[in-house]
Each structure stands twice: as structure tokens, then as C-alpha cells.
Image (cartoon, grey):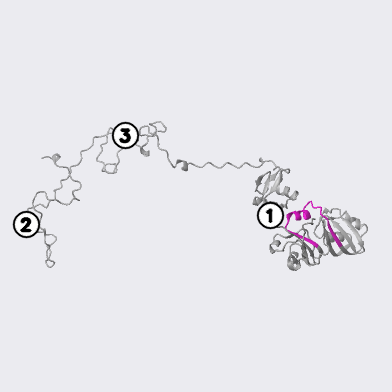
Amino acid sequence: MSDTNKPPEDPWAKWRRPAAVDASPAPETVTPKPAAEVPAPASAEPSVPESLAGRTLGVRKVEKKPARPERPARPGGKPVGPRDARGGDKAGRRDERPAGKSAGGKPSAKPWNKPSGDRPAGPSSPRGGEPRRENPWAKAAAPRPAPAAAVPAQPAGEAPSGVRLSKVMSERGLCSRREADLWIERGWVFVDGVQVAELGSRIDPSAEITVSTEAKKDQAKAVTILLHKPVGYVSGQPEPGCTPAVTLIGTDNQVVQPGDPEFKPWMLRGLAPAGRLDVDSTGLLVLTSDGRVAKKLIGDDSQTEKEYLVRVSGQMIAGGLELLRHGLELDGKALKPAWIKQLNEDQLHFILKEGKKRQIRRMCELVGLKVIGLKRVRIGRIRLGDLPLGQWRFLRADEAF
């Protein structure tokens, strides 16, 4: 009988439990030799029990399968051998096919086998015109559009128009410029109903400006204090050997008036002098945390009067009183006109609308006089009155500068 009529080979034969081919009885159990016996040499053939001689043990004889016939050569002329599990021939080489074709001549859907130009571009797939599946990640993977460029507030090369918001607020007396910047930064300012939170914003000077309730509450916490400063205390930055005047503000030195709020330590936060008073001078000193008060007293356009009593020594030059009233300059800048009256030989009465550093002392030196005592008795409409030296009080609600 030829090999072609043999039954097909069982691929699971080597894992299958051996079974008897014929109906012969099952083989007898072979009893192992005792451990005392010496085993046979490795080269000797194992002995077979006499009862099992000539019998088969139910294991089929495996016949070697003949090699598969060679495939016919392709049109290219290259013979193709048996393929392995990876799709190539036994030599490990893949068969060469035209791009986009499988072994059966069907178009391949693999992206690496796509033809470069044998089909028109379109939405259909290479498997027969089926629509392509939508990629669920295509939307997420698409590049995000670049953010639109911010429109410049003013064209390049042109000067910014309008007036700074903080300046307009200060000019209208809403607050000081420093307070305005703070409120703008916190988003408490509205221009024509629109919130403005960018520092340096410019607006139309006639625009309507409103502030939030938070700004009004913050401003209501501001306090203004009137102090009768003694000699030896500095009004502003401390100097060597001198004590700041703000250290006198406490419950021990307060003159309590009806309707005054209760003094709290937090009231000292942000408290600053509104105008200087020399360390050798005494009199009324205003300390405030209210920007409106500070602007009115020491702003660039302030017209608030300050009244002083000055004790002098020396001999005034001819026409000195007229020069004191108008005609002197300090630091290369002419002084504003002042009201000055001579009360007696050693006392002068000054009313100024400006407050340069040591201004009265320097003015008197220019006319031959030396100041030996200086006391400020009034600022605007607020007088020192009978406030004791070294004592302080709150500015009352019915008072204004």
C-alpha cells in the first residue's frame, strides 16, 4: 500500500495516553528490583520479562510525514517554499508580494501594505468601499487652536488716551491714590458699571465711578488722630536718638470725648503722619489712615492752611518781612505767597499753604533771624485748642479740615 493511503497522522499522539491496538490483555505490572540488587550497566539493554516478550504495548509506530510538494513558481519566477508560522518560507524569508495584496490576491487592509497611488483618495476603505470607522480619539488628539492674541489697548506708536483711574478717584475725593490702587487690585472699583481690576487702567475723566460695599467698609475703619507733639519726637521716619510720635498713641495718653470709638491696637495699622513737624518743634500733628484726609492735607494741589507761632532771635534785615511774605526761594524753587505778621520783637505769626522740610527755619535764616521755638496751632479748620502736651484725641465726626 502506498503512503498516500495511510491514515492521517494524529497530531496529539505524543500527548495521548497509549491504548492497546488489539484486544490482548493489559500488560502485567512489573515489580521493581530490590534496592540491594546491583543495577545493570548503562550500556546493557534492559531486560524484558518473559511474559511480555513479543508483545506490543499499545504505542503506534509514528511514521514520518513526507515533505509537502513544492509550490509552483510565481509570475516573478521565484519558487516559494513551505511557509512557517510567521508567514515566511522555512529559510526565514518572507515571500515578496505586490504592495496591498495578500496571499489570495485580495487587497490587504494593513497600513504597511497600502498602495501608494493605485486607488483614489476618499473616505472608503481598501476593503470594498466601506466607510471608514470614526476614530474616537481624533477629536482629543487634534491640536488645540492657538489662543487669540490680546487686542492692545492702544495702537502701537500712539500715546495712551484717558486718565489713570486712581488719579480720577483721588481728584474726586473718593480716596487717596494709594487706596485707589489697593481697591482696584481687589476688584472693588466699577467704571460705568463694569468692574476694573487692572492697575494703571485709563478711563474717560467724565466716567461714572462707584465702589463696592467692601471698599466702603474698609474706609469706615480708617481713623484720624490729633496729637500735641512734644519736642524730641519725630513725626515721620525715626532718627538716631529720637522716638516716633506714633508711640504716644495709646489708651494712657488719650483724651476721651463723647461719641469716640473705643481705641483698638489694630487702629495703628496704616497710621501715618499727614505733614511733617520737626523734631525741635511742637504743636498739632495729624496721623491718619484715611487717604482722603492725607490727600487734602499733603496732596500736590493742597490749599490747606497751616498756622504757626514762631519765636526768633537776631536782627531782621531791611525789607525782611516783605521777603518772608513773598520773594524767597528754597532749593532753587520760589515759595508760594505766605501770610506773615510780626507780633513783637521776638515773635512772628506764620500762615503757609505748603510744608517744605524745615521751611520756616530756613526762611528766617535768609532774613537774618534764628528760630528758637516753633509751635503749630492750626491745620485747616482744626485747631490745637487746649489739647495737653503729649496727649491725643480722635477727629470727631462733626469736624473736617
Percent of width and height locating residue 285:
79, 61
Q: CA distance from mark 2 to mark 1?
A: 117 Å
Disc 1 target residue: 217
Q: Residues within 10 Å of mark 2 (few under 14, many from 20)?
A: few
Q: CA distance from mark 1 to mark 3?
A: 83 Å
Disc 3 target residue: 106
Judged left or right of residue 316, residue 147 is left
Q: Of the residues shown, which amino acid type is indicated by label 3?
A: Lys
Magenta segment boundaries in residue numbering: 284-309
Disc 2 target residue: 51
Q: Is residue 83 above or below residue 356?
A: above
| Marks 1 and 3, the one that precedes in the sequence | 3
Q: CA distance from mark 2 to mark 3?
A: 63 Å
Percent of width and height locating residue 58:
12, 51
Front-most of residues 188 and 281: 188
Which marked residue is nearer to the observer: mark 2 or mark 1?
Answer: 1
Under circle 3, the secondary element is loop
